[in-house]
Amino acid sequence: MHEMSLASALMEEIDRISRQNNILRIDEVELRIGVLKQVVPQVMEEAFRAVSLGTLAEGAILRQVEIGARALCEDCGMEFVPAPDDFLCPVCGKFSRNLLEGDEILLGSLTCVT
Ligand SMILES: [Zn+2]
């Protein structure tokens, strides 16, 4: 269950942004999650609840947006959609882990009160 460490990192980022922008309270957090991170939304939700307790993001809505995976084959230049356990180019069959997106976690936006 790596959601807890992801949630902690997210909370640190939220905290930093809040201090820089004099944010008083956060109502909603949008999180963009690459599908290859294999985050379980329900577990992520619970982890966020736990790490945000007592912070200005306590009680905030966590909106999780899934980002699909895209990879680029270095051999033939084909862009394709890889599965978590299958990074073979559908055209030339070469293994490629040259990901364009789908392996990241990004803070999309914060809805807040300043
Ligand atoms: Zn290829």
Image (spheres, grey):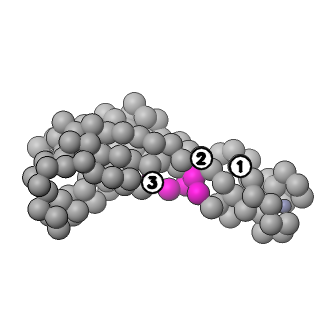
Relative depth, front residue between 25 and 33: 25
Circle number at residue 81: 1
Which range of residues does the magenta coloring cover? 101-105
Q: Tell me the residue at 39%/47% (across/down).
A: 31
* Residue 83 inside the magenta-drawn segment: no
Relative depth, front residue between 57 and 93: 57
Q: Do the residues labelled 3 and 2 touch (CB within 8 Å)?
A: no
Q: In the drawing, does residue 1 fall left or right of residue 51?
A: right
Relative depth, front residue between 39 and 79: 79
| Residue type, mark 2 in image | Gly
93 vs 51: above or below: below
Lower position in the chain sequence, tag 3 or tag 2: 2
16 vs 45: above or below: below
Residue 9 location, quadrant: bottom left
Q: Are marks 2 and 1 in contact (CB under 8 Å)?
A: yes
| Residue type, mark 1 in image | Val
Lower position in the chain sequence, tag 2 or tag 1: 2
Which structural element holds mark 1?
loop
Circle number at residue 68: 2
Q: Tell me the residue at 11%/55% (across/down).
A: 114
Q: Nearer the viewer, mark 3 or mark 2?
A: 2
Within 10 Å of the Cα at label 3, are there few (<14), some (14-19), or many (20+) other Cα atoms? some
Circle number at residue 105: 3
Within 10 Å of the Cα at label 1, are there few (<14), some (14-19), or many (20+) other Cα atoms? some
Q: Which residue lies furthest to the right in this view?
A: 92
Which structural element holds mark 3?
strand
Magenta: main secondary structure equals: loop
Residue 47 on image: x %, y %:
31, 39
